[in-house]
Amino acid sequence: MREPLSQLASYRALRVHALASKSRTLRELFARDRRRFDTFSLQYEDVLFDYSKNRVTEETIDKLVSLFSECEVESWRDQMVAGKPVNSTENRAAQHVALRDLNYLTCTCATQQSDVLQRMQAFVDEIRASDFTDVVNLGIGGSQMGPMLVCDALSDDVGAGLNVHFVANLDATEIHRVLQKLNPASTLFIVTSKSFTTQETLANAEVAKHWLSDSQRSGNNHLAKHFVAISANLEKALSFGVLPERVFPTWDEIGGRFSLWSAVGLSIALYLGMPAFRELLQGANAMDKHFLTAPPRENMPVLLALSGIWNQHFLQASAHAVLPYDVRLRYMPVYLQQLEMESNGKFVDRAGNDLEVPSSPVVFGDVGTNAQHSFFQLLHQGTQTISCDFIGVVKASHANKQQHDMLLANMFGQTQALMQGQTVAEVKAQGAAQSLAPHKTLPGNRVSNTILLKQLTPRTLGMLLAMYEHKVFVQGIILNINSFDQMGVEFGKKLASALLEKMQAVEPALDQDSSTNALIDFYRQNSSPVQNIASSK
Ligand code: F6P
């Protein structure tokens, strides 16, 4: 059993080092070393990773690499790839890497993936040659976010083909807004749920079922023709009414937030085509190979993870902002919220002991430049320490070079402003009145990574997403937590089911806490009578 993180020699050495280097500023570091970027940046294929705007020296990186070694991350990494049960609480392997490289034939999912890809290919060909015009993915969390991000990011390369829609929320507004624009006769639903028990997805699937049967246009076999399921729970998918040949598998060893590489990515394949889906997998595989073979100092996901640990544990950054400067990547913040916080938002270690150090930071973000006009003020002058990842793409999706130059100039300018700040003397030299000088001063010394892709393609996007998956894995191992379960989200779901019965009963005694009682009471008094699905449109 491993010692608590805070007791490890390398962790303690980092504490001492952080104290000793506390007064060192990024401005000084850049002024002292004109080649700082060369030392603290990496390029791999079309991905450039600049971590020079972190408050690190070569000594810091050495010490972080010692932590990486002491936590035996490489051994854990190799165990994960070999299909060992690194998901200890559920006694399962975590096999998303195997989906991208069939040489890792260590589990059922890897051996079946090749067949699944062939089935997906045949299905995509069939649907693209049919009268279907619209595909609606019904799924939530990992069964929605990855596929939605990829479809949205690469939508500029899609010609006139299928339209794709994503419905996740239990709020029926979402599905009704989508359905009202669609024709039942030409709509295909993909029910994407690993468990096939998720309340939101099943409720929306029922709405879709009624919508199709109400239309009378799709005949009696509407389920057979219009529904596909992606699930690890074949029995439940069949009892919902999906035909066996229309159920694509996913597996226990593939966590929801790591599942877009499986048939969960069927919406991607239908929308972008199977070659693009395969290219996405190849991109992720290229990043996997880099992660598996590059030494820690030259390893992008490892350095991304270590800079995060340094910022959060030793510079007290409690939040982390994800800032894509490209509208095509607008779903990166929400995608990474699930990937990072559902994986590493834990308060006990693998042995069930309380963590004495912070787990995942709060991840938030928005697309640049919009975010500059909402929360950037706090990034520049707020009192909290917040680390940032800026993500940009060199090649635009359009021909308006002037505007793309402006966009990237804003991104680079923001990383520079956060780093160098603006001193009182500089503010005064610009003519600011004495009384306003403190308000115009920016402390600077605020840390960020910059990730630049030469272009946004299925391959580079696959690389980017795999890079973050591995970052999360490395951090989870250093924290000594299980990044592959999500037991905390179950409790709220249970309470919601119990409360639903109370809310819908005629006059039950409300025996909850006073706040919950009053909220239910207010809701009961002001809500409309219960409607069934068919009449709720
Ligand atoms: O939020 C909990 C969670 O289990 C996620 O991990 C998962 O991605 C999501 O719900 C959806 O689960 P399923 O694919 O089983 O419907």
Image (cartoon, rainbow, N blue to C red):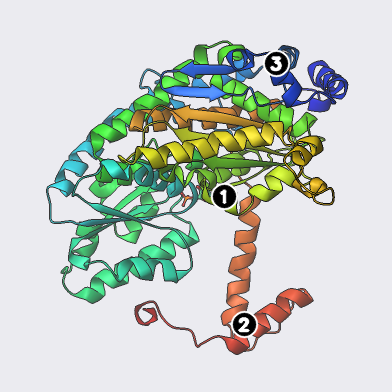
Residue sitting at 61 percent across and 66 percent down? 496
Instruction: Give the crowd class for mark 2: few <14, some 14-19, many >=20 residues within 10 Å.
Output: few
Query: Which of the marked residues, 3 or 2, is nearer the chain's N terminus?
Result: 3
The tag on residue 523 is 2
Residue sitting at 34 percent across and 58 percent down? 239
Give the labeled residue for mark 1.
371
Disc 3 and disc 1: Cα gap in Å?
Answer: 31 Å
User: Residue 29 location in percent, x, y?
Assistant: 73, 19
The tag on residue 61 is 3
For badge 2, the amino acid type reads Tyr
Q: Is residue 259 above or below residue 467?
A: below
Query: Which of the marked residues, 3 or 1, is nearer the chain's N terminus?
Result: 3
Residue 207 falls in which quadrant of the image? Answer: bottom left
Q: Secondary structure at mark 1?
A: helix
Pointer 2 residue Cβ closer than 8 Å to ligand 1:
no
Viewer-nearest of discs 3 and 1: 1
Viewer-nearest of discs 3 and 2: 3
